[in-house]
């Protein structure tokens, strides 16, 4: 479903300083951009930005970059971060395949992939999944920590676990129902919009953490 155009979108894209217009010039120099030596965490496909903005707000000593390829989607995150006055975040309009042009080797301490498109026709569309080995090969040289993955789609989750194993990634903290038995809704503060929807309707959330290089954890 296409995001509806918003009247304020053009102004937000033009005037919001959190949108990084030339992200490729920051490759390997993100600490300089943020003006500190804090760890860098990146979300691929930030959507409307609820997760990344709230996570950044709760962790002011960590730098965050939200990557999203759709202009009409990223604007919501941009406005949210601006209104909350969050300084330790930047937004990039790009596709996941372009990450090696934007980030340097071992520059990312944590990579988030939350509720990405499952591309249900595995035979035809598998290579478009953000956990396909082609994308894992993009992430691997950039990551000096872990990849955090969440989905509500069991087929995608099983596929992803298989791709991690096939490509030598160590996987831990596997959960097929992340919030089972939990009634405390405090965690909703940093849920994505989709995640909250699933949580409230009782849909199981599957998650795991994966490390490249066979679990050579920093």
Image (spheres, helix red, strand yellow):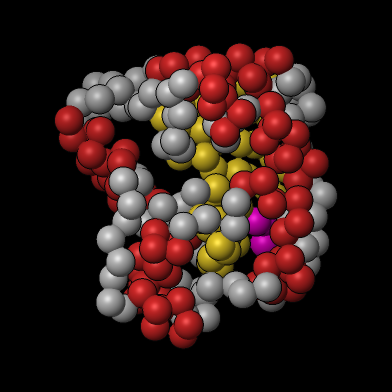
Q: Residue at x 25, y 25 (%)?
A: 203
Q: Which of the two residues, 132 or 5, is positioned nearer the viewer here?
A: 5
Q: How many marks?
A: 0
Give coordinates of residue 40: x percent, y percent: 65, 56
Q: Say if the magenta span includes residue 206.
A: no
For residue 15, above or below residue 79:
below
Magenta stretch: includes residue 37: yes
- Which residues lie in the magenta part? 36-40
| Residue at the farthest front position | 124
Q: Residue at x 31, y 27 (%)?
A: 179
Residue at 54%, 27% in the rendered image: 125
Residue 165 shows up from this direction: yes
The relative height of residue 123 versus residue 137 in the rendered view (above or below) is: above
The residue closer to the viewer here, 198 or 181, is 198
Residue 153 pos. (x, y %): 38, 23
User: Residue 204, position in %: x, y?
Assistant: 30, 23
* Position of the C terminus by quadrant: top right
Residue 29, percent across and down?
78, 67
């Amino acid at each position: 479903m296409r995001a509806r155009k918003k009247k304020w979108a053009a102004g937000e894209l033009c005037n919001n300083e959190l949108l990084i217009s030339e992200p490729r010039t920051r490759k390997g120099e993100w600490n300089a951009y943020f003006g500190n030596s804090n760890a860098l965490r990146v979300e691929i496909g930030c959507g409307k930005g609820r997760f990344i903005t709230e996570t950044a707000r709760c962790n002011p000593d960590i730098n965050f970059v939200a990557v999203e390829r759709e202009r009409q989607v990223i604007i919501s995150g941009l406005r949210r971060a601006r209104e909350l006055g969050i300084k330790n975040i930047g937004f990039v309009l790009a596709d996941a395949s372009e990450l090696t042009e934007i980030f340097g080797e071992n520059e990312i301490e944590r990579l988030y992939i939350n509720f990405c498109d499952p591309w249900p026709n595995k035979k035809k569309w598998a290579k478009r999944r953000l956990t396909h080995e082609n994308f894992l090969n993009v992430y691997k040289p950039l990551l000096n920590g872990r990849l955090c993955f969440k989905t509500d789609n069991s087929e995608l989750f099983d596929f992803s676990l298989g791709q991690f194993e096939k490509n030598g990634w160590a996987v831990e903290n596997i959960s097929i129902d992340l919030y089972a038995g939990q009634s405390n809704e405090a965690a909703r503060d940093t849920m994505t919009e989709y995640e909250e929807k699933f949580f409230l309707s009782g849909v199981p959330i599957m998650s795991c953490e994966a490390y490249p290089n066979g679990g050579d954890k920093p």
